[in-house]
Amino acid sequence: MEYASANSARKMHSRLRDKDRWCNNVVKLLRAFLRHDQKRGIPILENMDKEALKQVSFSRSVLDNAIENDHEIVEILAELDIDPQDCSSLPDTMDGNNTGYVTTAELIIGLSRLRGTARRSDIVSVDLMIRSLQMKVDDLWCWMKDMERRKGSGVHVRPSRQTVRVGNPNGGCFNL
């Protein structure tokens, strides 16, 4: 049993490192998405240079519709080792800046990060990013409270371009 599990893990690792497999399937996926978005007049992939491809973006609704209605796209995503449960939320996941559109760069980067099974390191990485963001929000809140306090006391506050860390890891704010 242990051998079978280790062997399966080795095979998956090999699949995930196969660059030809990755590239071929990404190109197939982009072609399939372009077919679904032809009403915008985007040329077929063979007619595009690298710079033109970078400029292509797909609306989330086009991606949703394509994933929902095109079995070939779901098969390509499976060949890319994307979990089928992630397919339905793929456009929302890829649209990190919440514009309603997914660029080819966002799509490719997002697909590369979704491949394979979720690992503990993925969860820890997100937790660390959230903690870092929380510290920055806390610092900003402390800075704003301090500016509000100074403004109310009649002290003239002139904005500065210099970044000052006003929070501390133990809570509270430094008095400037």
Image (cartoon, rainbow, N blue to C red):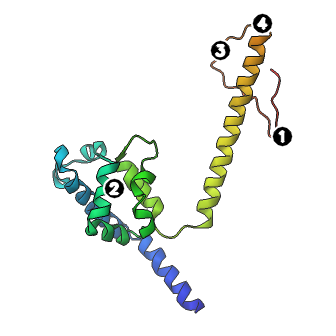
Residue 154: give its label: 4
Q: What distance separates the C-alpha of mark 1 from that of mark 2?
A: 45 Å
Residue 62: give its label: none
Pick the front one: 100 or 26 = 100
Of circles 2 and 3, which is in front?
A: 2
Question: Is 60 rendered above or below residue 16?
Answer: above
- Residue marked by disc 2: 64
Q: Residues within 10 Å of mark 3 (few under 14, many from 20)?
A: few
Q: Residue at x 62, y 19 (%)?
A: 161
Residue 65 in the image: x percent, y percent? Answer: 29, 57
- Residue marked by disc 3: 159
Amino acid bearing label 3? Pro
For the residue labelled by badge 4, is the local secondary structure a helix, a strand or a loop?
loop
Q: Of the two numbered discs 2 and 3 on the same chain, state the one appearing first in sequence.
A: 2
Q: Residues within 10 Å of mark 4 (few under 14, many from 20)?
A: few
Of circles 2 and 4, which is in front?
A: 2
